[in-house]
Image (spheres, coloured by chain):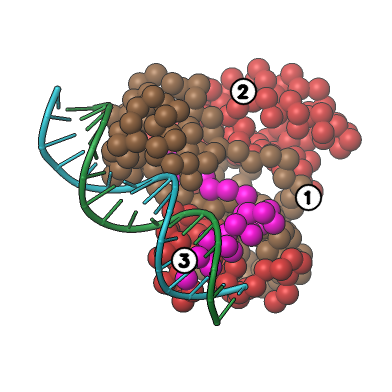
Chain colours: A brown, B red, C cyan, D green
DNA sequence: ATTGAAAGAGTCTCAGT
DNA sequence: ACTGAGACTCTTTCAAT
Protein backbone atom coordinates (compact mmCIF):
# COMPACT_ATOMS: atom_id res chain seq x y z
CA UNK A 1 0.00 0.00 0.00
CA UNK A 2 1.47 3.35 -1.06
CA UNK A 3 0.68 6.70 0.48
CA UNK A 4 0.47 10.22 -0.91
CA UNK A 5 3.01 11.46 1.65
CA UNK A 6 6.14 10.08 3.25
CA UNK A 7 4.35 7.76 5.63
CA UNK A 8 5.91 4.40 6.34
CA UNK A 9 5.02 1.32 8.32
CA UNK A 10 6.35 2.71 11.62
CA UNK A 11 4.26 5.88 11.24
CA UNK A 12 1.14 3.82 10.68
CA UNK A 13 1.93 1.61 13.65
CA UNK A 14 2.27 4.69 15.84
CA UNK A 15 -1.03 6.06 14.55
CA UNK A 16 -2.67 2.69 15.10
CA UNK A 17 -1.51 2.42 18.71
CA UNK A 18 -2.37 6.01 19.55
CA UNK A 19 -5.76 5.88 17.88
CA UNK A 20 -7.14 3.93 20.80
CA UNK A 21 -4.85 5.42 23.46
CA UNK A 22 -3.30 8.77 22.68
CA UNK A 23 -1.84 8.92 26.19
CA UNK A 24 0.66 6.08 25.81
CA UNK A 25 4.22 7.19 26.62
CA UNK A 26 6.86 7.43 23.91
CA UNK A 27 9.06 5.09 25.94
CA UNK A 28 6.40 2.38 26.12
CA UNK A 29 5.38 2.85 22.51
CA UNK A 30 9.03 2.56 21.47
CA UNK A 31 9.39 -0.69 23.37
CA UNK A 32 6.27 -2.06 21.69
CA UNK A 33 7.50 -1.15 18.20
CA UNK A 34 11.19 -2.01 18.79
CA UNK A 35 12.61 1.50 18.37
CA UNK A 36 13.87 4.10 20.87
CA UNK A 37 11.63 6.68 22.53
CA UNK A 38 13.58 9.35 20.66
CA UNK A 39 12.52 7.89 17.33
CA UNK A 40 8.86 7.87 18.40
CA UNK A 41 9.25 11.49 19.40
CA UNK A 42 10.72 12.48 16.02
CA UNK A 43 8.04 10.59 14.09
CA UNK A 44 5.14 12.08 16.03
CA UNK A 45 6.60 15.55 15.60
CA UNK A 46 6.89 14.93 11.85
CA UNK A 47 3.32 13.60 11.62
CA UNK A 48 2.09 16.68 13.43
CA UNK A 49 4.00 19.03 11.12
CA UNK A 50 2.70 17.17 8.07
CA UNK A 51 -0.85 17.57 9.37
CA UNK A 52 -1.41 13.81 9.49
CA UNK A 53 -2.01 13.98 13.23
CA UNK A 54 -4.35 16.85 14.08
CA UNK A 55 -4.40 16.51 17.86
CA UNK A 56 -5.93 14.53 20.69
CA UNK A 57 -9.43 14.55 22.07
CA UNK A 58 -10.89 13.40 25.33
CA UNK A 59 -13.51 10.67 25.09
CA UNK A 60 -16.29 11.72 27.43
CA UNK A 61 -19.32 9.85 28.73
CA UNK A 62 -21.91 12.40 27.63
CA UNK A 63 -24.72 11.07 29.82
CA UNK A 64 -22.52 11.53 32.89
CA UNK A 65 -22.20 15.26 32.24
CA UNK A 66 -25.88 15.78 31.56
CA UNK A 67 -26.16 15.31 27.80
CA UNK A 68 -28.82 12.69 27.26
CA UNK A 69 -29.77 13.16 23.62
CA UNK A 70 -27.72 12.35 20.52
CA UNK A 71 -29.40 12.87 17.16
CA UNK A 72 -28.64 13.17 13.47
CA UNK A 73 -30.32 15.73 11.25
CA UNK A 74 -30.70 15.22 7.52
CA UNK A 75 -31.02 18.59 5.82
CA UNK A 76 -32.64 19.33 2.45
CA UNK A 77 -31.52 22.60 0.86
CA UNK A 78 -33.59 24.76 -1.48
CA UNK A 79 -30.52 25.11 -3.69
CA UNK A 80 -27.20 23.34 -3.14
CA UNK A 81 -25.40 26.63 -3.73
CA UNK A 82 -26.67 27.72 -0.32
CA UNK A 83 -24.41 25.20 1.35
CA UNK A 84 -21.73 27.63 2.57
CA UNK A 85 -24.19 30.11 4.01
CA UNK A 86 -26.24 27.43 5.80
CA UNK A 87 -23.06 25.86 7.20
CA UNK A 88 -22.08 29.22 8.66
CA UNK A 89 -25.43 29.47 10.45
CA UNK A 90 -25.26 25.90 11.76
CA UNK A 91 -21.77 26.52 13.14
CA UNK A 92 -23.32 29.09 15.47
CA UNK A 93 -25.44 26.43 17.19
CA UNK A 94 -23.08 24.95 19.80
CA UNK A 95 -25.05 21.73 20.17
CA UNK A 96 -24.31 20.84 16.55
CA UNK A 97 -20.96 19.08 16.79
CA UNK A 98 -20.49 17.91 13.24
CA UNK A 99 -21.63 18.85 9.77
CA UNK A 100 -21.05 17.16 6.42
CA UNK A 101 -21.90 18.16 2.91
CA UNK A 102 -23.40 15.01 1.47
CA UNK A 103 -24.78 13.31 -1.59
CA UNK A 104 -27.60 10.79 -1.33
CA UNK A 105 -30.79 11.28 0.65
CA UNK A 106 -29.79 14.68 2.05
CA UNK A 107 -27.80 17.73 0.98
CA UNK A 108 -26.26 18.14 4.40
CA UNK A 109 -26.01 15.95 7.40
CA UNK A 110 -25.53 17.15 10.97
CA UNK A 111 -24.91 15.55 14.35
CA UNK A 112 -26.31 17.19 17.45
CA UNK A 113 -25.88 16.62 21.19
CA UNK A 114 -28.47 18.04 23.60
CA UNK A 115 -29.16 17.93 27.32
CA UNK A 116 -32.69 16.64 26.80
CA UNK A 117 -35.38 16.24 24.16
CA UNK A 118 -36.77 19.66 25.02
CA UNK A 119 -33.53 21.31 24.01
CA UNK A 120 -33.47 19.33 20.75
CA UNK A 121 -37.06 20.28 19.94
CA UNK A 122 -36.28 23.93 20.64
CA UNK A 123 -33.33 23.95 18.23
CA UNK A 124 -35.30 22.11 15.52
CA UNK A 125 -38.23 24.51 15.79
CA UNK A 126 -36.69 27.83 16.71
CA UNK A 127 -33.23 27.78 15.17
CA UNK A 128 -33.28 25.51 12.13
CA UNK A 129 -36.62 26.74 10.81
CA UNK A 130 -35.27 30.27 10.61
CA UNK A 131 -32.16 29.47 8.63
CA UNK A 132 -32.54 30.78 5.08
CA UNK A 133 -31.92 28.05 2.53
CA UNK A 134 -33.09 25.02 4.50
CA UNK A 135 -36.10 23.46 2.81
CA UNK A 136 -36.82 20.82 5.45
CA UNK A 137 -35.09 18.52 7.91
CA UNK A 138 -35.42 14.94 9.06
CA UNK A 139 -34.41 13.99 12.58
CA UNK A 140 -32.92 10.64 13.48
CA UNK A 141 -32.63 10.13 17.24
CA UNK A 142 -30.09 7.67 18.59
CA UNK A 143 -31.58 5.40 21.22
CA UNK A 144 -28.31 3.63 21.83
CA UNK A 145 -24.76 3.69 20.54
CA UNK A 146 -23.80 0.10 19.71
CA UNK A 147 -20.15 0.95 19.19
CA UNK A 148 -17.78 3.74 18.23
CA UNK A 149 -14.15 3.03 17.36
CA UNK A 150 -11.27 4.50 15.40
CA UNK A 151 -10.51 3.17 11.94
CA UNK A 152 -8.29 0.12 12.06
CA UNK A 153 -5.16 1.11 10.13
CA UNK A 154 -3.28 -2.09 10.94
CA UNK A 155 -4.54 -3.78 7.78
CA UNK A 156 -2.81 -1.12 5.71
CA UNK A 157 0.61 -1.88 7.16
CA UNK B 1 -27.16 22.96 36.50
CA UNK B 2 -27.10 19.80 38.60
CA UNK B 3 -25.44 16.54 37.63
CA UNK B 4 -26.27 12.92 38.32
CA UNK B 5 -22.81 12.35 39.84
CA UNK B 6 -20.42 14.37 41.94
CA UNK B 7 -19.23 16.62 39.17
CA UNK B 8 -18.50 20.24 39.96
CA UNK B 9 -17.46 23.31 38.05
CA UNK B 10 -13.75 22.48 38.15
CA UNK B 11 -14.39 19.00 36.73
CA UNK B 12 -16.34 20.49 33.86
CA UNK B 13 -13.67 23.08 33.20
CA UNK B 14 -11.07 20.30 33.02
CA UNK B 15 -13.26 18.32 30.64
CA UNK B 16 -13.85 21.42 28.55
CA UNK B 17 -10.15 22.23 28.20
CA UNK B 18 -9.15 18.65 27.48
CA UNK B 19 -11.95 18.08 25.00
CA UNK B 20 -10.06 20.10 22.42
CA UNK B 21 -6.56 19.24 23.66
CA UNK B 22 -6.20 16.12 25.74
CA UNK B 23 -2.42 16.55 25.73
CA UNK B 24 -2.26 19.70 27.88
CA UNK B 25 -0.06 19.23 30.96
CA UNK B 26 -1.55 19.14 34.44
CA UNK B 27 0.75 21.99 35.41
CA UNK B 28 -0.46 24.25 32.61
CA UNK B 29 -4.07 23.28 33.10
CA UNK B 30 -3.74 24.04 36.81
CA UNK B 31 -2.34 27.48 36.06
CA UNK B 32 -5.23 28.15 33.69
CA UNK B 33 -7.85 27.11 36.24
CA UNK B 34 -6.09 28.58 39.31
CA UNK B 35 -5.43 25.32 41.15
CA UNK B 36 -2.32 23.21 41.63
CA UNK B 37 -1.20 20.50 39.25
CA UNK B 38 -1.81 17.99 42.04
CA UNK B 39 -5.48 18.94 42.18
CA UNK B 40 -5.83 18.48 38.42
CA UNK B 41 -4.21 15.08 38.79
CA UNK B 42 -6.63 14.00 41.54
CA UNK B 43 -9.68 15.25 39.61
CA UNK B 44 -8.74 13.53 36.37
CA UNK B 45 -8.08 10.30 38.25
CA UNK B 46 -11.51 10.58 39.88
CA UNK B 47 -13.24 11.31 36.56
CA UNK B 48 -11.55 8.25 35.06
CA UNK B 49 -12.63 6.02 37.93
CA UNK B 50 -16.18 7.36 37.72
CA UNK B 51 -16.24 6.53 34.00
CA UNK B 52 -16.89 10.15 33.04
CA UNK B 53 -13.65 10.26 31.07
CA UNK B 54 -13.28 7.16 28.89
CA UNK B 55 -9.87 7.85 27.36
CA UNK B 56 -8.12 9.86 24.69
CA UNK B 57 -8.14 9.47 20.94
CA UNK B 58 -5.83 10.70 18.26
CA UNK B 59 -7.39 12.98 15.67
CA UNK B 60 -6.09 11.77 12.33
CA UNK B 61 -6.28 13.29 8.87
CA UNK B 62 -7.85 10.27 7.16
CA UNK B 63 -7.06 11.38 3.62
CA UNK B 64 -3.37 11.57 4.52
CA UNK B 65 -3.29 7.89 5.44
CA UNK B 66 -5.17 6.77 2.36
CA UNK B 67 -8.79 6.79 3.49
CA UNK B 68 -10.65 8.91 0.98
CA UNK B 69 -14.27 7.95 1.53
CA UNK B 70 -16.50 8.75 4.50
CA UNK B 71 -20.11 7.66 4.30
CA UNK B 72 -23.19 7.11 6.40
CA UNK B 73 -25.46 4.12 5.95
CA UNK B 74 -29.11 4.19 6.95
CA UNK B 75 -30.31 0.66 7.63
CA UNK B 76 -33.89 -0.64 7.48
CA UNK B 77 -34.47 -3.85 9.43
CA UNK B 78 -37.06 -6.51 8.62
CA UNK B 79 -37.94 -6.64 12.32
CA UNK B 80 -36.48 -4.35 14.98
CA UNK B 81 -35.91 -7.37 17.20
CA UNK B 82 -33.05 -8.30 14.85
CA UNK B 83 -31.06 -5.32 16.08
CA UNK B 84 -28.60 -7.19 18.31
CA UNK B 85 -27.81 -9.86 15.74
CA UNK B 86 -27.29 -7.33 12.93
CA UNK B 87 -25.09 -5.18 15.18
CA UNK B 88 -22.91 -8.21 15.85
CA UNK B 89 -22.43 -8.77 12.12
CA UNK B 90 -21.66 -5.10 11.43
CA UNK B 91 -19.04 -5.06 14.19
CA UNK B 92 -17.09 -7.58 12.15
CA UNK B 93 -16.66 -5.12 9.27
CA UNK B 94 -13.62 -3.05 10.31
CA UNK B 95 -14.47 -0.13 8.04
CA UNK B 96 -17.68 0.50 10.00
CA UNK B 97 -16.50 2.74 12.82
CA UNK B 98 -19.77 3.62 14.48
CA UNK B 99 -23.24 2.17 14.82
CA UNK B 100 -26.35 3.60 16.43
CA UNK B 101 -29.76 2.14 17.09
CA UNK B 102 -32.08 4.86 15.93
CA UNK B 103 -35.65 6.03 15.65
CA UNK B 104 -36.80 8.14 12.70
CA UNK B 105 -36.05 7.37 9.07
CA UNK B 106 -33.91 4.32 9.79
CA UNK B 107 -33.73 1.50 12.33
CA UNK B 108 -29.97 1.67 12.51
CA UNK B 109 -27.42 4.16 11.40
CA UNK B 110 -23.78 3.39 10.62
CA UNK B 111 -20.68 5.39 9.77
CA UNK B 112 -18.10 3.87 7.46
CA UNK B 113 -14.59 4.87 6.39
CA UNK B 114 -13.10 3.33 3.22
CA UNK B 115 -9.93 3.71 1.18
CA UNK B 116 -11.87 4.41 -2.00
CA UNK B 117 -15.33 4.15 -3.52
CA UNK B 118 -14.55 0.66 -4.78
CA UNK B 119 -14.05 -0.59 -1.26
CA UNK B 120 -17.33 1.04 -0.16
CA UNK B 121 -19.23 -0.52 -3.08
CA UNK B 122 -17.78 -3.92 -2.26
CA UNK B 123 -18.93 -3.73 1.38
CA UNK B 124 -22.39 -2.49 0.40
CA UNK B 125 -22.86 -5.25 -2.17
CA UNK B 126 -20.97 -8.19 -0.76
CA UNK B 127 -21.14 -7.79 3.00
CA UNK B 128 -24.30 -5.86 3.87
CA UNK B 129 -26.54 -7.69 1.41
CA UNK B 130 -25.72 -10.98 3.08
CA UNK B 131 -26.55 -9.95 6.63
CA UNK B 132 -29.78 -11.64 7.72
CA UNK B 133 -32.31 -9.11 8.97
CA UNK B 134 -31.33 -6.10 6.87
CA UNK B 135 -34.20 -5.17 4.57
CA UNK B 136 -32.42 -2.44 2.66
CA UNK B 137 -29.87 0.34 3.10
CA UNK B 138 -29.44 3.92 2.00
CA UNK B 139 -25.98 5.35 1.52
CA UNK B 140 -25.10 8.96 2.21
CA UNK B 141 -21.62 9.87 1.00
CA UNK B 142 -19.81 12.80 2.58
CA UNK B 143 -18.27 15.09 -0.01
CA UNK B 144 -16.79 17.38 2.60
CA UNK B 145 -16.68 17.71 6.34
CA UNK B 146 -17.63 21.31 7.21
CA UNK B 147 -16.67 20.96 10.84
CA UNK B 148 -16.29 18.46 13.66
CA UNK B 149 -15.89 19.61 17.25
CA UNK B 150 -16.45 18.39 20.79
CA UNK B 151 -19.55 19.46 22.68
CA UNK B 152 -19.08 22.82 24.36
CA UNK B 153 -19.58 22.10 28.06
CA UNK B 154 -18.62 25.60 29.16
CA UNK B 155 -22.22 26.77 29.01
CA UNK B 156 -23.11 24.22 31.66
CA UNK B 157 -20.69 25.65 34.17
C1' DA C 1 -10.24 18.65 49.22
C1' DT C 2 -6.06 21.39 48.17
C1' DT C 3 -1.23 22.54 48.43
C1' DG C 4 3.79 22.46 47.89
C1' DA C 5 7.70 19.83 47.72
C1' DA C 6 10.30 15.63 46.81
C1' DA C 7 10.87 11.46 44.15
C1' DG C 8 10.20 9.18 40.11
C1' DA C 9 9.12 8.98 35.17
C1' DG C 10 8.84 10.94 30.80
C1' DT C 11 10.11 14.24 27.07
C1' DC C 12 13.24 16.54 24.20
C1' DT C 13 17.74 17.53 22.28
C1' DC C 14 21.95 16.40 20.36
C1' DA C 15 26.45 14.37 19.40
C1' DG C 16 27.81 10.04 17.52
C1' DT C 17 26.99 6.45 14.27
C1' DA D 1 17.53 8.00 10.10
C1' DC D 2 18.25 5.87 14.66
C1' DT D 3 20.39 5.59 19.29
C1' DG D 4 21.63 6.58 24.01
C1' DA D 5 22.61 9.78 27.38
C1' DG D 6 22.00 14.26 29.60
C1' DA D 7 19.09 18.23 30.69
C1' DC D 8 14.81 19.47 31.47
C1' DT D 9 9.86 19.11 32.43
C1' DC D 10 5.96 16.71 34.06
C1' DT D 11 3.53 13.37 36.87
C1' DT D 12 2.65 11.27 41.12
C1' DT D 13 2.75 10.81 45.97
C1' DC D 14 2.34 12.49 50.51
C1' DA D 15 2.61 15.09 54.87
C1' DA D 16 0.51 19.26 56.32
C1' DT D 17 -3.43 22.18 56.32
Q: Position of residue A14 (x, y in %)?
A: 42, 33
**Element class at badge 1:** strand
3D distance between C-alphas at marks 2 and 1: 25 Å
| Mark whose residue sits in front, 1 or 3 | 3
- Residue beneath disc 3: B37
Q: Chain of mark 2?
A: B
Seen in the picture, residue B88 relative to B44 is either above or below; the reply is: above
Q: Chain of mark 1?
A: A
Seen in the picture, residue B127 relative to A142 is either above or below; the reply is: above
- Residue beneath disc 1: A143
Q: Chain of mark 3?
A: B
The residue carrying pointer 1 sits among few (fewer than 14), some (14 to 19) or many (20 or more) residues within 10 Å by Cα, namely: some
Q: Is residue B140 magenta?
A: no
Point out the tag, 3 or 2, that comes first from the N-terminus. 3
- Residue beneath disc 2: B123
Q: Which mark is residue B150?
A: none
Q: Position of residue A95 (x, y in %)?
A: 60, 64
Amino acid sequence: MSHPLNIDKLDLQIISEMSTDAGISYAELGKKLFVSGGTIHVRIKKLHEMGVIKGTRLQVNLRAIGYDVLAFIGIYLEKSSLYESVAKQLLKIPQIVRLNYTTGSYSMFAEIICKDSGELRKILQDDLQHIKGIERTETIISLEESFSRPINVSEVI
